Image: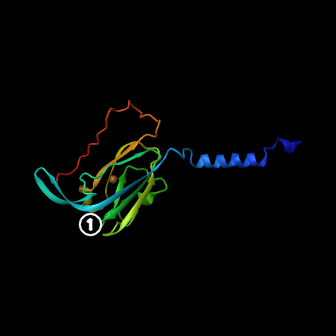
Amino acid sequence: MGASLLPSPPFLAVFLFSLVTFSVNPEPALAITRHYKFDVMLQNVTRLCHTKSIVTVNGKFPGPRIVAREGDRLVIKVVNHVQNNISIHWHGIRQLRSGWADGPAYITQCPIQTGQSYVYNYTIVGQRGTLWWHAHISWLRSTLYGPIILLPKRGTPYPFAKPYKQVPIIFGNRL
Ligand SMILES: [Cu+2]
């Protein structure tokens, strides 16, 4: 009598599996992993009729933009091809359980040495908007930087009217 009120074992197993799966990862199909490669290298750059060899990411100044949606995982391999030790800080990103990916050299990581690489791996949680990344060691931050654009989840509106167009504007040092 009392036993007939209990759910059958297979039903209970499916229910518990769903409960555990969806409480750990509520939207498994929506978030993706985005891969980037940052080659830190010297590059001749001309500004205001003046050419100078500077440290860049992928030969670009300002550096490449990172684009992700809220909930996405970012996997960014940084390879150091210059003579200086480097690290990259993902400015404003909340590093939840990924503090080792934050980037300040000698604080959360050893700097990446010449010829070495490091893979930054973190997830965007509860953030959208435009942030930036930059070198977090010595004077290298003066030329190593670029935008991080965090879009809302698919189907989630901006907390304001949807912009017609977006153009990141980055202020930096004159070379
Ligand atoms: Cu910063």
- SS for dot 1: loop
Q: How many marks?
A: 1
Near-viewer residue (151 or 11): 11
Residue at 28% over, 57% down: 58
Report the colour scheme: rainbow
Residue at 34% over, 66% down: 112
Vertical placement of 81 versus 126: above or below? below
Does 19 sit left or right of 68 as displayed? right
Vertical placement of 99 versus 147: above or below? below
- In the rendering, at what x and y percent does residue 68 appear? 40, 46
- In the rendering, at what x and y percent does residue 2 appear? 87, 43
Near-viewer residue (144 or 28): 28
Vertical placement of 81 versus 49: above or below? below
Question: Outermost residue, left direction?
Answer: 49
Q: Quadrant of the N terminus?
A: top right
Question: Outermost residue, right direction?
Answer: 1
Residue at 29% over, 42% down: 168
* Label 1 CB-ligand 1 distance < 8 A: no
Residue hosting label 1: 82
- In the rendering, at what x and y percent does residue 65 appear? 32, 49
Does 45 sit left or right of 11 as displayed? left
Does 108 sit left or right of 80 as displayed? right
Question: Which image quarter: residue 129?
Answer: top left
Near mark 1 (Cα within 10 A), the count class, few <14, some 14-19 or many ≥20, is: some
Q: Quadrant of the C terminus?
A: bottom left
- Residue type at mark 1: give it: Val
- In the rendering, at what x and y percent does residue 107 appear? 38, 63
